[in-house]
Image (tube, rainbow, N blue to C red):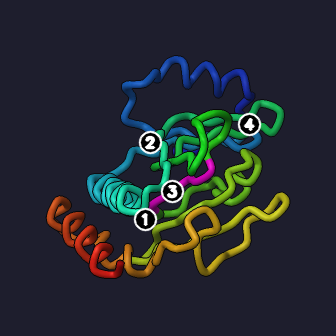
Amino acid sequence: MTLWDIRWKDYEAILRMLGDQAGVRVSYLRGILEFMSPSERHESLKKMIARLLEMYALEHDIELVGKGSMTIRKREKERGAEPDECYFVNRTARGFPDLAIEVVLSHGAIDKFELYAGLGVKELWLWEDGTLHVYRLRGERYARARKSHLLPELDLSHLARFVEREDQTRAVREYRDSLRARH
């Protein structure tokens, strides 16, 4: 559901009203307010990407602080988002996350690139049509990248091969084993 001409103070009031237990994700971009209720498939995909990324970080001794879909917002930029997953990479969890991950099964009214660029998120990863696409913030816009700048050794196409597996635990174990074999 999308609403237009919503003031920032109304957005904040809605967030307070929904609280932490709501099963709805809320995005806000300069007066546009979007509500999304994630499907089971959406949640399975985002969770699998998170589990695989976290396994990669463990296997490579990378400091990764996951914050899930925490609300990040910037009043002066009139932006607020609840990414599917977000992370701080090799630093303490202060300010805005370095990485936001979004699973795209359908497109809403809010431009995710404009939204996250205004929040200063360094990398935006989009899972769409079976592929993990990486976008790196350059100035005030995202540019498509072949690999992650935050995790330059990560083979994204290799990770992507495990995302749509039914058995999450088995897939994570197989991914771990494949990472160890590559070393």
Point out the frontmost of discs 1 and 4: 1
The answer for how far apart the CA atoms under marks 4 and 3 are is: 27 Å
Q: Residue type at mark 4?
A: Asp
Name the residue at 46% across, 21% down.
Answer: 19
Q: In the rendered view, does 75 fall on the left or right side of 2? A: right
- Can you identify the residue that label 3 sits on? 101
Amino acid identity at mark 2: Gly
Amino acid type at circle 3 is Ile
Question: Does residue 167 lie above or below 110 as drawn?
Answer: below
Pointers 4 and 2 in contact (C-beta within 8 Å)? no
Q: Position of residue 170 (x, y in %)?
A: 15, 65
Main secondary structure found in the magenta portion: strand
Q: Which residue is mark 2?
A: 68
Residue at left offset 52%, top offset 47%? 87
Q: Is residue 65 magenta?
A: no
Residue drawn at (53%, 62%) of the image:
107
Residue 86 location (% of width, % of height): 51, 47
Image location of residue 68, percent across then percent down? 44, 42
Q: Which residue is mark 4?
A: 5
For the residue pair 165 and 58, the one nearer the viewer reads as 58
- What separation in Å lies between label 2 and label 1 (alpha carbons)? 18 Å
* Residue at mark 2 to residue at mark 3: CA–CA distance: 9 Å
Of the image marks 4 and 3, the number of the one nearer the N terminus: 4
Q: Which mark is residue 105?
A: 1
Label annotation for residue 59: none
User: Can I make out residue 92 in this image?
Assistant: yes
Q: Which residues are magenta?
A: 98-103
Q: Earlier in the sequence, mark 1 or mark 4?
A: 4
Identify the image quadrant of the C terminus.
bottom left
Quadrant housing residue 74: top right
Q: Residues within 10 Å of mark 3 (few under 14, many from 20)?
A: many
